[in-house]
Amino acid sequence: MIAAAVEQRLLGLIGIGLRGRLVVVGVDRVREAAGKGTLLLAFVAVDASKNSLNKIVPLLEAKKVRTIDVQSAATLGGAVNREATTVIGIVDAHLAKGMCSILDASVVRA
């Protein structure tokens, strides 16, 4: 798990990315992007249903997409104005690179 402050910063960036159509939301959209090879980064709710996780996690691992675990589907959904969501994918290279930089910097300081 990532620190709460870092998680909030990343969730804010997801919201901005949603407005710019730089992210995809939901299992089906993320699976589609992964299949096309356009998925660069994925945020996965660790409390999502086992069925949903079984649909997406093996695919992300097979495609070697970096995943970030988020505490809850409600937290993840809040970033995109939904009640809850299992997964959000980043399809823009610049946004994904910036998010990875934030994550990597937080790990170095920890």
Image: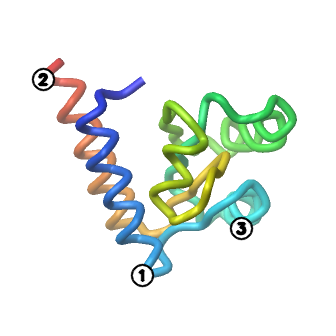
How are the colours assigned in the image? rainbow
- Amino acid tagged 3: Lys
Is 84 placed left or right of 5 in the picture?
right
Q: Which corner quadrant holds the C terminus?
A: top left
> Mark 1, residues whose alpha carbon is within 10 Å: few (<14), some, or many (≥20)?
few
Q: Secondary structure at mark 2?
A: helix
Q: Residue at x 68, y 65 (%)?
A: 33
Q: Residue at x 52, y 68 (%)?
A: 23
Marks 3 and 2, how far apart at CA: 35 Å
Marks 3,2: beta carbons within 8 A: no
Marks 2 and 1, how far apart at CA: 30 Å
The answer to which of marks 2 and 1 sits earlier in the sequence is 1
Name the residue beneath numbered marker 3. 36
**Residue furthest left in the image:** 109
Q: Secondary structure at mark 3?
A: helix
Is 98 placed left or right of 92 in the picture?
left
In the image, residue 80 lies at what x, y percent?
51, 64
- Nearest the viewer among 84 and 106 is 84
- Amino acid tagged 1: Gly
* Badge nearest the viewer, 1 or 3: 1
Q: Secondary structure at mark 1?
A: loop
In the image, residue 20 lies at what x, y percent?
42, 81
- Nearest the viewer among 54 and 97 is 54
User: Which disc number belongs to residue 20?
Assistant: 1
Name the residue beneath numbered marker 2. 109
* Badge nearest the viewer, 2 or 1: 1
Above or below, comparing residue 40 to residue 94 in the picture: above
> Mark 2, residues whose alpha carbon is within 10 Å: few (<14), some, or many (≥20)?
few
Is 91 placed left or right of 51 in the picture?
left
- Nearest the viewer among 77 and 101 is 77
- Nearest the viewer among 37 and 95 is 95
In the image, residue 38 lies at what x, y percent?
60, 66
